[in-house]
Amino acid sequence: MEQKTLTIHQQILGAKKNGQKLLAILLDPDKIVWENLDYLLLKINQSPATHIFVGGSIVQSTILEDLITQLKQKTNLPVIIFPGDPSQISPQADAILFLSLLSGRNPDYLIEYQVQAAPILKKTKLEVISTGYILIESGNETAVARVSKTEPLNRENFDLALATAQAGEMLGNKLIYLEAGSGAKKAVPLEMISLIAQNIEIPVIVGGGIVDLHGIKKAYKAGADLVVIGTAFENDSHFFDS
């Protein structure tokens, strides 16, 4: 009997169940130095990364397409779109995080962009993974806050962050993504990660403000199932070299 291939979401659930921690490298197409792309992909292939996220707050669609094509040709990792808006969709990827910005009250990012994206996604074979996206205050205004015109949650208000994550789970989201933002001064508080991870059943993704391997390990220990590294790897392709 032919064995059915697990979806990316099923793989993430399986990893959580087995205590396997996952790592995604986030590539912003607008920040890619194309002459260095082959070397960057070599370093990704040598890293402990399990997934590649692609996206940014503002990305030209042609650049997105070109980058994903290169990633699919030169890596074996699943490529997941981490979109800033409905224009950031490519059928070349394996999956897309179908984000709803739960920390803000801008209707465009809660439902409007999702309505625009749905008919486009229906025409692709992309795996659509519903994700509750929660922006946490990080010491400076991030691109996500600026573009979405929303305020992040207070980093000291753990109860509100937990209630927001629980509401996302109850709404049917398959993942919760705690985001400090690209280039954040401070990462998501470890106590907040721990509180949320212990009080929801779905996997927790944590990204933003993690600048070294020690930061990744601390996020894992706090309860993150998948950690996302973006700016730190962009700035130093030797990030994972021991």
Image: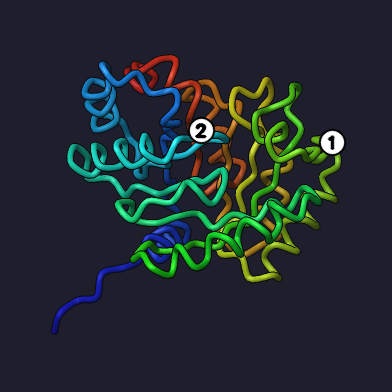
Structural distance between the alpha carbons of marks 1 and 2 = 22 Å
Query: In this rendering, is residue 232 above or below 108?
Result: above
Count of all numbered marks drawn on residues in the image:
2
Residue at the image point whose x is 35% and y is 38% from the top:
49
Query: Mark 1: which secondary structure?
Result: loop
- Asked if residue 38 lies left or right of residue 15, the reply is left
- Asked if residue 205 lies left or right of residue 189, the reply is left
**Mark 2 neighbour density, 10 Å: few (under 14) some (14–19) many (20 or more):** some
Please, what is the three-letter code of the amino acid marked with disc 2? Lys
User: 180 and 108: which one is in front?
Assistant: 108
Please, what is the three-letter code of the amino acid marked with disc 1? Glu
Q: Quadrant of the C terminus?
A: top left
Q: Indicate which label's residue lies in the foreground, 1 or 2.
A: 1
Q: Toward which corner of the image does residue 58 lie, by quadrant?
A: top right
Picture disc at residue 217: 2
Residue 60, position in %: x, y?
Answer: 45, 35
- Asked if residue 33 lies left or right of residue 149, the reply is left
Residue 43, position in %: x, y?
Answer: 27, 24
Residue 52, position in %: x, y?
Answer: 37, 41
Residue of label 1: 156
Query: In this rendering, is residue 145 above or below 115?
Result: above
